[in-house]
Amino acid sequence: MNTILDQWRAELTVTDRPDEYEVKRLLSRLGLTVPRGIRIGPAAIDGVPEFSGPFVAKVCSPDIVHKTDLHGVHLNLGPEELAMALGALRNAFPETAILVEQMVSFDGPEMIAGGLIDPGFGPAVMVGAGGILTEIAHDVAFRLAPLDDAEARRMLEELKIWPVFEGYRGLQLDPAALARLIVTVSRLVDALGPRFDQLDLNPIVWSHTGWMILDAKLLLHAVM
Amino acid sequence: MTPNRPDLKRLFNPKAIAVIGASNREGSIGRIIFERLIPSLRKLYPVHPRESHIMGYTAFAEIAMLPEGIDVALLATGAEAAVAAAEACAVKKIPFLIIVAGGFGETGAAGARLEARLQEIVSRFETRILGPNSLGVFIPGERLDTIFVEHGDKALGSGGGVTFITQSGSVGVEALGLASNTGYGMRAFVGLGNKCDLDELDFLDYFGRDPETTCLAFYLENIAHGRRFLEKARQVTPHKPVLVLKAGRTAAGARAVSSHTGRLAGMDAVVSGAFRQFGIQRVLDDEELCDASKCLAMLPPARGPRVAVLTPAGGFGVMAADYIEADQRSMPLSMAALAPRTVRRIRDATFPFAACENPVDLTASADDGMFGRSLDALIEDDGVDIIICTAFFAPPAISDGLIAEIAARVPRSPKPLITFTQYGPFTDLYLRRFHDAGVVGFPSVSRAVRAARFLVERARILAALKEQP
């Protein structure tokens, strides 16, 4: 874990301020699944992804927290629409990178996982019902980091939406795999130590055969 | 270098106690505290600058003149004087100081400076401080009591073994006063006060190892060494329940956050999650803290969630069933399906017309013996994990002998037996009688059902601990 982290930090465009693309690369190296994607740097006029559509294009900057609110996310794009979306993003966010991803289909609920530093207890992780309504539903469970699979499983069992993992409406979601994801998140939070500030993985969805993290945000503290 | 710290045993079982600020003046705190210590039969050394005797005990003009071998000094002076006295006691090598005075960190910057001076004393000497702003300790079994306000001590029952550790003196004494009315047994009370030195972690460690403590109950507004407290709790919970009322739940989210995760944590959800992870049972108010500690100290964990309800009054049986089946998310309970043999046994022991499905309604015609025999049938039914027994004394065939009927079953029952009783103006008295007979009782259906959930939670914690490597 520490080797992966050191190497990843050394590669960041801006020290300790990873953008979404970079956060997802880290998650991928830790064995978690993210959509296929490329980052198109601020200088480039256009870029051609090596994967097929439909595409998602979103502004990719550690400075922009609420991408959707600022019309910084374009979904479900064909090749021509992608070119138009890239142009629109360029105009709206000059000098800013763009992340182009393969848009994935998914079944079942959007989940959220994350991490934070509790002022009293230190590094903690969360899992819950995700998506844009997550703060209204408030269906979440917390534990301190790090934790094991059994404890992560108990977090899921605590959720109101737990029945979706027990075959609700024919859904075939794998709670054990989501528990492993939480364990990985908890190890990441723990390994980042005093550098760690906040982490959001939202949404996390069940896509075909596994849990996929569609959006990710990681805030680090600058540590001398 | 940290000085060598004395064993807390000397604080809780002292042989010799000095009272700085002991007084003959009626109504003064120095007098009340001294008076309360006389029945402890320990050697008492009052310190007073002018008086030659305090309540018949030879007084010492200065701390420096005290004899050697004092275990605890109680500082019943004002804040400024307490700081000077604390230093003199530390020089005298008195291992434990209880500082009653307020006027420290809780009052502002000037008070905080005084409190910092106490901490400085602790860092230089071996002496340890409980408080300031502490009610001190109350150990019923040792007849040691420094609490100078009413705290239900005269009503306190025997047994129970709860150690009650509270950051707020008022919450502690009022909760105990009320709980004592209806039966509450206590091993120890500790008023933490401002925690300038000794804090919840010290007492969790000490009473976690104390064989006479069967349950630890905390009222806390902040947890000094959060992670270490949790880790210590995990060492204690395999042996005895640890309950925490962590007040100040809305303040946790005060820190500005830009993530969903941070905002979702706002209402101190991390505290709840961390408590579950480390085997701590969380309660939300003083009544719940007393109810939960009372039942966890006296009853075994529930093997499962299936509850049987025995009642002489149909209405309370129906309400109990509603409470049991409601709130299915956190700590679910269910109404037990009774075995046909159980139903037959109860019918044979009572009336052909008795409703022997769960809830079992014996009707107001039932007598004491019918209750006892019905309880036997429920205790021996493997499909029942918890029994809630409604005890009413108004029905003509019911006598005070019902208390003994139920009490005789408690030690024989491997499953928890909780009693709900109401008897108009005599309710508290009868709950006390149940308690003194070893029966855990509550004055409402909802509190009896809530108690059952704590016993299920306790069993789950023990099961989760077994899973861990």
Image (tube, coloured by chain):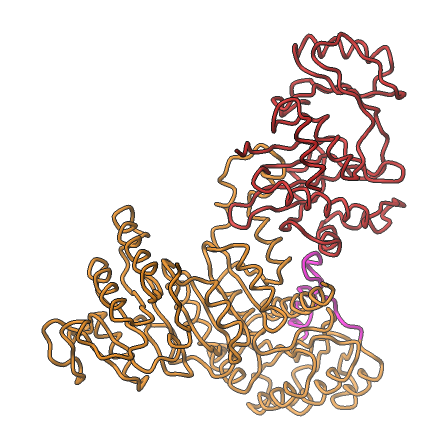
Chain colours: A red, B orange
Residue at (46, 65) in percent of width and height:
B202
Q: In which quarter of the image is the N terminus of chain A?
A: top right
Q: Which residue lies furthest to the left in this view?
A: B50
Looking at the picture, tell me which residue is in the foreground, A182 or B152: A182
Looking at the picture, tell me which residue is in the foreground, B250 or B37: B37
Q: In this view, does B221 lie above or below B162?
A: above
Toward which corner of the image does residue B98 lie, by quadrant? bottom left
Q: Is residue A211 above or below residue B285?
A: above
In percent of width and height, residue B119 lies at: 33, 56
Compared across the picture, whether B358 is left or right of A52 comes to left
Compared across the picture, whether B107 is left or right of B219 comes to left
Q: Does the magenta stretch include residue B325?
A: yes
Compared across the picture, whether B78 is left or right of B244 comes to left
- How many marks can you see? 0
Q: Is residue B46 above or below residue A149?
A: below
Magenta span of residues: B314-337
In percent of width and height, residue A30 lies at: 76, 39
Residue at (75, 74) in percent of width and height:
B358
Q: Is residue B231 magenta?
A: no
Compared across the picture, whether B301 is left or right of B135 comes to right
In percent of width and height, residue A141 lies at: 66, 48
